[in-house]
Image: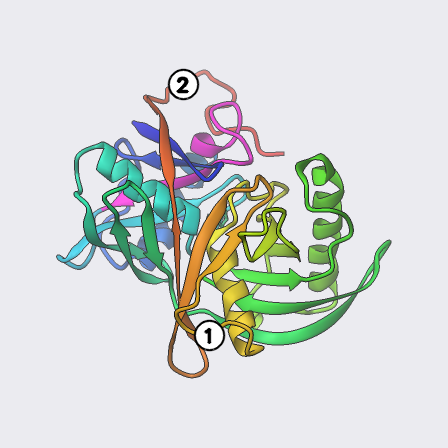
Amino acid sequence: MVIDSHTEGEPTRVVISGGPDLGLGSISERMQRFCAQFDHFRSGIVCEPRGSEVVVGALLLEPVQPDSSAAVIFFNDVGYLGMCGHGTIGVLTTLAHLGRIDPGLHKIETPVGTVETTLHEDGSVTVENVPSYRYQASVEVDVPGYGLVTGDVAWGGNWFFLVADPPCELVTANRNELIAASTAIRVALHASGVTGRDDAYIDHIEFFSEPKNPENSSRNFVLCPGASFDRSPCGTGTSAKMACLYDDGKLAPGVIWRQEGILGTVFQGSIREGSDGQVNPSIRGHAWVTGESKLLFAGDDPFSRGIEF
Ligand code: PYC
């Protein structure tokens, strides 16, 4: 059984039953087992013909700690995500829809750490994301067809390369151009050996511009792992962005940062000072449940494991 929702436009598919038996252990150990033994389950759930490249899957698991409300592994059409901001908001909204949680504080275990979340009375959700930081500032990379591109490498629960100078206006009509440019940057980063800490592959590319709505702080476009872009303002991307702004002395703790995404929807963010120059970001947004379904996998279906392009 799955429950589908969207968070500010970006879909999440929460697997509430029928998932693989990943045994006991930490959430990271269970993710490794999922990846090694049940990757066909990931692709069958989120890839076409049951899903699409835009869907982020969330496998609900028993938490390790008794005071956690759930543990979750996020995945998409090409692999696994350490953390997912919009997905966490989707998970909380799904748990509330199922009557499993009430408004209040809820700890959610993820492979990159436990995040504290609040389900508000109005249905919105705040996620206190994992500590975030800028790893490298103003990195130059030569991108074939685009020339020298400058950006920051930052961690917000996933690795990001943040570029303040987009190749065109950040509007959905330009999505193909934005996907092509951000994909070229990702390839060039990899080819030139630019990585996150411990040689981590940078799989998210984020462009920024002025917001369309003057009430907001900034607008973004985020390329996700694979070839799809985030329809929401991207929770981990907003966290990475706020870490960079803090490093530049442009965002003080407690000040509200309104991140507008490509559809014009908004995550409201802020930071608290953390240790070692890191920040503890929080993002607030809203998800809506769009469906409850039972996915079927017939034995003779050639695409029971999904179509991987
Ligand atoms: O909201 O953190 C996020 C996210 C990552 C990939 C898609 N959404």
State left or right for residue 81 relative to residue 17: right
Q: In which quarter of the image is residue 299?
A: top left
Q: Residue 300: x, y in percent?
A: 45, 16
Vertical side of 155 occupied by 294: above or below:
above
Please, what secondary structure does the residue beneath circle 2 have?
loop
Tell me where the magenta segment starts and ends, as one range.
44-61
In magenta segment, residue 54: yes
In magenta segment, residue 38: no
Vertical side of 138 occupied by 167: above or below:
above
Q: What residue type is labelled 2?
A: Gly
Please state which of residues 63 and 221 is positioned toward the viewer in this rendering.
Answer: 221
| Residue appearing at x 30%, y 39% in the figure | 93
Q: What residue type is labelled 1?
A: Ala
| Residue appearing at x 70%, y 44% in the figure | 179
The answer to whether residue 197 of the structure is visible from this angle is no
- Tell me the tag on residue 299: 2
Please, what secondary structure does the residue beneath circle 1 have?
loop
Vertical side of 251 occupied by 229: above or below:
above
Q: Residue 215: x, y in percent?
A: 53, 52
